[in-house]
Image (tube, rainbow, N blue to C red):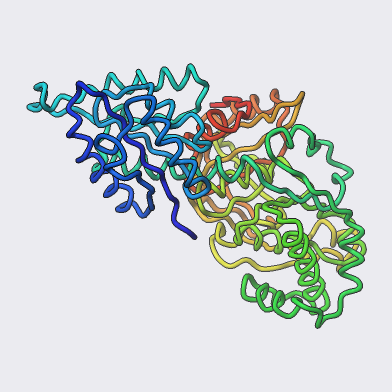
Amino acid sequence: MKKMVFALCFGNRGFMPGELILGARDEMVKAVTDAGYDYLIMDADATRFGAVETRDEGLLYAKWLKQHEGQYDGVIFCMPIFVDENGAINALQDAGVPILMQAYPDEIGKMDFKYRRDAYCGKFSVTDVFSQYKVPFTVLKPHVVHPLTPAFRQNLDDFAAICRVVNGMKRFNLGCIGARTTAFKTVRFDEITLQKYGINVESFDLSELICKVKEMDDHAPGVQEKLAMLRNYTDFSGVPEVNVHTIAKVGVVIDEYIRDYHLDAIALRCWNEMETYLRVCPCALLGELNDRGIAASCEIDVCSAITMRAMQLASQAPATVLDWNNNYGDDEDKVVLFHCGPVAQSLMKEKGKVTEHKMFAKNDPGSGWGTNEGRLAAFPMTYSNCKTEEGLLTVYVSEGRITDDPIEDGYFGCAGVAQIDHLQDKLIRLARGGFKHHTSIAKGHLKAILEEAFTTYLGYDLVQID
């Protein structure tokens, strides 16, 4: 994965101790590189102290930034002192990426005129003007922070995650393979609304996929490689060879769609045509796609694929979509989250086992090979989903944890017990809000990062359920 790059910008104001800017340049470079990121910085001799104060200096920085367009993921605006907001807004109003506002703290014992920074106050001056100009920016706790501190390291990592989400979500391609699953109106969505938010949906007829698979020879390009990958990915030892080959062929066709249409995410109609005509379920393929970084949801749940992609970008790890499926005894703050088997292997306790889907086997034995059964590992988690309604992309985000509570062996599919504070109140809000029976989950507590990306930069309609 290539390093993220931050463009560094420094502010100045003539009557403040500008010499402090030179130290700030060195300290910010050290902070960014020590955290594992890369940077772009304007030459120190391009302006006084290599910072922006006047409108002309701001325009000079904006020109420099334009010359490096596409080379940076975000901008860090550093305020070593109380800076001039006019140079700042001229420099960054067309940055086109997230902007982190960082201001230096003053030090006790260094509050005389030679060393006093006043950046605590000056930060408000800059954020006020950016707000007036409708230029989005990010502010994090604490209000002032030295670059060479653990607190700023956390700021940097959070800002990097925000940048990944914003830059990855503002324009991407989502493949919708098959029509909406007939029985589920819950997964309906509005393509035009999604396009308004930069999400382009490409639709594919499932019959085309089925025909491509049926016409494909066992030694067609990519099939043997896909077989080897799948057998290494999870346990296919109990699956009949003919079904393993069919699953591999389905994977080859999906990979072709991803490659040819530059898809970043997919939603797949997974029942019941695949089971009826191909005698397989695509669950294990979806899990592998998620481990590969392609957000992949089942049951044509496009909205879940959207939040899965956002969480993948934030966490740099796979996400998955699960049903709000069962109560866990009498504990009102626990719920069994389940799906048949499309969970990314890396989210599971141990290697899964590919089985026949018990729901399909009940009425049509031999029709449902492909579910990757297992149990979720224990981890802190974020859960989220969205809907399209009246031209808005409306999203919720909250947090909890997947526990190590046992689920009996007879419970089929892949599942885990989630503990969520005040779960019953949140379920009422989800039901009243018209959200589906699915939720997307990912490792880590990402709520603040996702909400900042969704509301400040992407313009999503956020519903608070906490």
Q: With respect to residue 363, does 248 lie above or below?
A: below
Residue 270 on image: x %, y %: 81, 55
Q: With respect to residue 94, does 148 lie above or below?
A: below
Q: With respect to residue 337, does 145 lie above or below?
A: above
Snapshot quadrant of residue 21: top left
The residue closer to the viewer here, 179 or 270, is 179
Q: Is residue 319 left or right of residue 278?
A: left
Q: Is residue 332 left or right of residue 153?
A: right
Residue 320 on image: x %, y %: 63, 50
The residue closer to the viewer here, 134 or 49, is 49
Marks counted in the figure total 0
Residue 29 on image: x %, y %: 29, 47
Q: Is residue 96 left or right of residue 290?
A: left
Snapshot quadrant of residue 424: top right
| Residue for point 56% across, 57% down | 347
Snapshot quadrant of residue 76: top left
| Residue for point 72% across, 55% down | 340
Residue projecting furthest to the bottom: 219
Q: With respect to residue 87, does 270 lie above or below?
A: below
